[in-house]
Each structure stands twice: as structure tokens, then as C-alpha cells.
Amino acid sequence: MNRIVAKEEFSQNPSVKMMQIEAPRIARKAKGGQFIVFRLNETGERVPLTVADTDPEKGLVTIIFQEVGKSTMALGKLEVGDCLADFIGPLGQPTHMGDFGTVLCVAGGIGIAPTHNIVKALKANGNKVISILGARTKDLLFWEDKMRDLSDELYVCTDDGSYGIHGLVTKVEQELLEKNRETGEIGLVIGIGPPIMMKFVCKTSEPFGIETLVSLPTIMVDATGMCGACRVTVGGETKFVCVDGPEFDGHKVDFDEMLKRQGIYLEQEKVAVERYQHGDTCGCCDECGGDK
Amino acid sequence: MAEEKKVNKAKKLPRHPMPEQDAKVRAHNFEEVPFGYSNETAMLEASRCLRCKKPKCIEGCPVNVKIPEFIGLIADGDFLKAAHKLKETNALPAVCGRVCPQESQCEALCVLTKKGESVAIGRLERFAADYERAQGKIELPEVKPATGKKVAVIGGGPAGLTVAGDLIKLGHQVTIFEALHKTGGVLVYGIPEFRLPKAIVQAEVDYLKALGVEVVESYVVGQIETVDELLERFDACFIGTGAGLPVFMNIEGENLNGVYSANEYLTRSNLMKAYLFPEYDTPIVKGGRVATFGGGNVAMDSSRTALRLGAEKSYIIYRRSMDEMPARDEEIHHAGEEGVEFLLLANPERLIGDEKGWLTGVECIKMELGEPDESGRRRPVAIEGSEFVVEVDTVVVAIGNGPNPLVPSTTPDLKTNRWGNIDADPETGATNMPGVYAGGDIVTGAATVIQAMGAGKIAAVAMHEYLSEK
């Protein structure tokens, strides 16, 4: 159960990795936009990750993660053949599907992973898809080929100009939406990536009056609607990302509140990472060599 | 006349207190508060029971435990048999002996209460169950021949565990589907270690497994498989998914950092063991000044957990007075002993935060009690202009839970009421869907462990009948 059958490192700094997990039921059931929760071991926390791809026939679920905290670092240490204590899903609502005409998908960094699974579903539903992929630098870009195969048009941006268009994804988004004023073919924008990026994807699309969906990576515990850790304000109302989302109308999301809530455990996360990397120290002077 | 004599004898022998950890010590650890009776004390306490011919106590028990019989066995020193007697009707005696509100159920009806104090039924129940577990001699009851019928139990909480225990003994094949990674429902995520050690819940679940119940954890019914899909491979379903939807106050500032639902606060601490961070990975805000809103058992659990996590101040803020508090007397008493401060007749109006989004205080308004409302309790009325601010860095909202919508929302044919609770016949647990039964908090709204178990018992009888006719 929950065995890792494939692993690939996409980039080293920061470390982004891909894993395929044997989870046949989830692979059959998960739809674009849904997520899973993993727990490494008995002392592990419950961590949500949006599904990047599924292979229902082989019973595999693909996840892509950046090593940002102790749990993702420890996950990255596991190898093919290892098992996760828990791999729970699918969770959350699938992306609302329909014929939207043309959908503009803006994916930044690790956000390319969930976007891939959504684009797959959009294409299966007969939509035309224009994708914009963004990364800080060329080395951090992944799955360009997969996204190119799925998309009708694809643009790649890097912040430092090391590859593709030099600039932010919102620059291309702005240009495409300007052009769209005449054709009016784009019926939906989907923006997935770091919260700041999503906020600006929404700011860019708002004057054009085009519905924009974002997928929110909030903190969760049970991820079944029970605890409310993931609550966000959408259009003045409190929503639970785990059961009402993870996707919401980005023009109504209170991103500033969400960003603050993302930081609740920053201090504890530092302690956990410190302890993970340097052993069980008190973290005060570094002189005990990890004995205390 | 003879009865009178016995009553007098019992009166002379006072109800035996249960030794417990000193309040000052236990307020800083997560170990269980009471230690339980010794063999001698248990026998003495059991000898107070009058063995009434028409025992009233049984009527007060939602699962009709044969109280005088098991107490009689304790009085005779046959502790193992007492435990077996309990298990004839109650699958979770070690749990019930700890968390049942006996004072308003079995013990409230004990004849001795008229002339003094009731027999300590709950403490004796706990004693017998603990004795059996400590002996390591868990006797498995006889299981009826296999019927070939398959039952899916959705939710591994008190209701589901009861249904599973009863139906497996009747020869049906039972599978429990639990959404979380540990089975037990509120017994593992909600009730803290210091009130119900998790090893005890695990032992009860292991007992069911030994009886043949299959337990599938981390399986979110409604998502991975719907009830309709389950019905294709099971002959009947029981839905016991509980009241897992936290209710917030809907006041300004509720999404500030440092504001928790009781569900989140307790789940982090209990299920995820955040009190052992960083040994365990899940963090929790260890507040210095914590306020818990509400006056029920969950509020007591939260405020006492806050102390154990290191809070210097732990307040209960409740809009009525001590008399109206729904929590058990014992819990209120324990909380007070440990240093929880009660701010009564006060209602939170607004939460105040700093520019970084962290909670700094709660503005409350003073209340006074007016005429009784539909619950029979005097309605609290705000006193105009009486606002005051309590400085806190953590708030736990413990004002109740709604029904978890995951199963009802993915079962289109299932009838629910306007609050989202499943409509189930109180006599049988039957829903409007053939073969689908429900019980516990998902039907009644947030109630007690034993009420959920009572609903499970009722449903198990009806389900057995349904399966036998099918």
C-alpha cells in the first residue's frame, strides 16, 4: 500500500521532486483539481498535496513537491520501494468542468503540477487551452513537454530571462487578455502557483471581467471539513478549502488574510527543520554537537 | 423493612472517592487524572449496591448495562466475570466508565440517591474493564455462525464501533471505514489523553478486530467511494459520521492567527500529538493567555489542554452562569481545581488582532439572565455599554458542531433535515434508503458518547432483522 514506484528530482535548489505512488483506488477516482493528504509515519503530520497526474490503469498517482519543511524534506529522502504510512484521497471538489471555450491556464513554479491534471480534464471536455508556465529560472521549470502536448498554445516565462520570455507570467497574461478583447474567446482563467502570483494573476484578469479560478494551498489537519484550519474568506464569507475548495473565485479571495494564515507555524517549522537536519538539539548554541 | 435496613447500611458506608493526581501537578501533564479504584475499594463500593429487584439504574443507561449483576460480581471479587457481564451489552466499558455522564443517567436513578449518594456505577464499570485489560485475559464472546451478509460501517466512532461489535457477534461480516488514520472518532481526536488514554481506545478497537471486524482507516467515504457504491458490495450500511463540522461565532476577527475551533485545537493535540512537538511533527500554538468560548465538556477539555500546553492563563468565557453550564459537574470541578478561570455572563463580541494578523484580545459584553428560553434555561441578555477587553493570544471556539456534510452531500437520495442531519427513525435507525441506517451525532446533532452508542445498539437490532429477512 502507498508504495513509491517512481521518483525523479526535477531541480536541486530548491529541491523539487516527483513521485509516483501506488494507490489504485485514488488513481481511479481522483479528478482534476483534487488533492491527497500524506502522512509519512507514526509521528508524521498530515500534509495536503494537489494531484499532478493519475494513471487509472496502472493504479498510480503522481505528486510533485518542493522541499520546504521537515515533512517534504523527509518525503524527498524516501526511495522507490518505500511506503507512506497514509495516502488519503481524493479530497476536495474537482475543478468544475464544462465547455468554457478557451481557458487560459497560468501556472507558476510548483503550480504546474496541479495545473497539468486540470488541463488534462479541460481537454477531455473539449476546451481549447492556452497555458503560461512561469519559473524563477530555467532549472526550476518542469513538465514543459507534457504541458506543450496538452495545450493548444504555450508560453514559458522566467523571472531572470534564462529561458523563454523574460518576465512574470502576468505580463503574458495581460497581453493575451488585451488581445482577447477583440476575439472574446477566453471564457475562464485558472491561476495556480505561489499565493502572491495567484493574487496578481487575479488582479490582472479582474479589469477584463473574466472569471478566474485559483487553487489555495492552505494549512490543513484532517482535510475532511472537521477542523477549520484551512478557512479562508471568499466574498466576505468564511469557507473551508478542504471541502468547499480547493478552488475558488480568485476575484473574491482575501489573499492578504490567507498569506498571514499561511505563516502561523513558521517558528515551529524552523524548529522542526533544524531538529531534522542537525539532530535533536536545543538549537541554542550548537556546541553540544547534537547530543542535547 | 429489610430494604430499609440495607439502605441504612449503605448510607453508613459513604461513596468511595477515586484517588487522582494532584491538581497542581496534573495541570502540567497529559497523564490520566484519576487513578481508579483498588480491588479492595471496588469491592467495598460494590457492597453498597442494594441489588434492587426492579433496578432503576438500568433504565437510565442508553445501552441497558446489567448494572446490579456486574456490581454483584465485583462485590464477590469475581472481577473478570464482572467485565464479561458488562461486555454483554456494552462494547466499550473502559470508555464509558470514564466519559459517560453517569450523574444524569444510571446514578441519577440509583435508589441510594434519595437518602445519600448513589453507588459509583461509573467508577466500578471502569474498574472492571481496566482489571480485565490489565490481566491481559480478554475473553472473546461466542460469535454466531456466519450469515454470509456483509455490512459497511461508515465512521469508526462510538456509534459505529457499537454497531460493528453487535453485528459481528450475530455472525455478519463487518467492515468499518474510518476517514482518519486512527479509529475511534471523537474518542481519539476529541477527548484528551488525560481524560481517556488512547491506549484504552486502541484496546477496544483491537477487541473488535479480534472478533473479526475489518477496519479500513484513511478511507474517506463520500470521496473514494460513495454510499451508493458501497451498497453494490455490501448488504447494508450504517452511517455514523458524527458532528464533525465546527461552528464558529461569526464575529469579527475569527480568522486571525491564534483562533482555533475546538475540533482543530483538540485534534492537533490528541490525534496528532502536538503536545509532543517536535518529537511529533504537528505543531500547535502554545498560547500564554488562552480563552475558550463555551460551557460544554469540549470547552472544559480545551481549557484544560491549554494549561497542559503551558498557558499561564486559561479562561472559559461563557454567556450564561455556572448553573446553566452543560458540561459535567466533574469536568467543571476538575477544570477549576487545575486553575481554569471562569468569566461567566460574558459574550465575545469581537476579536482584536495586530497588523500581522495575530490575535491580541477579545472584546466581550456582560450579560444578565432574563426569562427562560425554549431550552428551559434563562436567556442571557446583553447589558448595554458593558463591553470589556480580555487580553489573549489564543482563542478556542467550543460552541458546538454541525453534522459533517461529506456523506450526506454525496448520497443524493438520502433524506436530511434542514440542519443537514440525517433523518433516521429513532426506534430503528432506518433512513429513507433501504438497507441504510444511521445513528449518533450525524442524526441527533452533538450529544454524548453513550447516546451515540445507544443509537448504535438500536440500529444493530434493526439491521440484524433487515439482514435476516433479506
Image: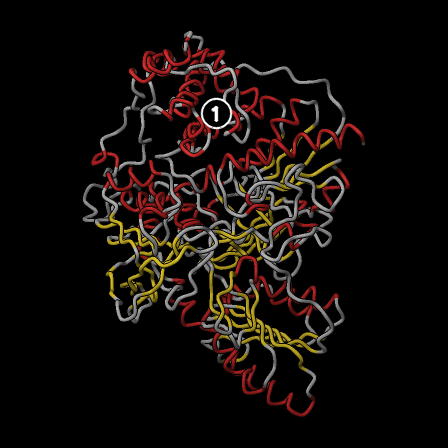
Q: Nearer the viewer, residue B238 or B358?
A: B238
Query: Which residue shows up at 69% across the image and 78% down it?
Result: A102
| Quadrant of residue B456 within the rendered picture | top right
Work out whether A75 lies above or below A114. above
Q: Where is residue B172 in the image (x, y as percent from the top left)?
A: 70, 26
Q: Where is residue A222 in the image (x, y as percent from the top left)?
A: 50, 49
Query: Which residue shows up at 60% across the image and 49% down it?
Result: A89
- Residue lying farthest to the right in this orientation: B470
Residue A135 visible? The answer is yes
Work out whether A213 lies above or below A288. below
Reading the image, the residue beneath label 1 is B57
Work out whether A126 lies above or below B47. below
| Quadrant of residue B261 within the rendered picture | bottom left
Q: Quadrant of the N terminus of chain A?
A: top right
Q: Quadrant of the C terminus of chain A?
A: top left
Q: Residues within 10 Å of mark 1 (few under 14, many from 20)?
A: many
Instruction: Say what amino acid the circle numbered 1 marks.
Output: Cys
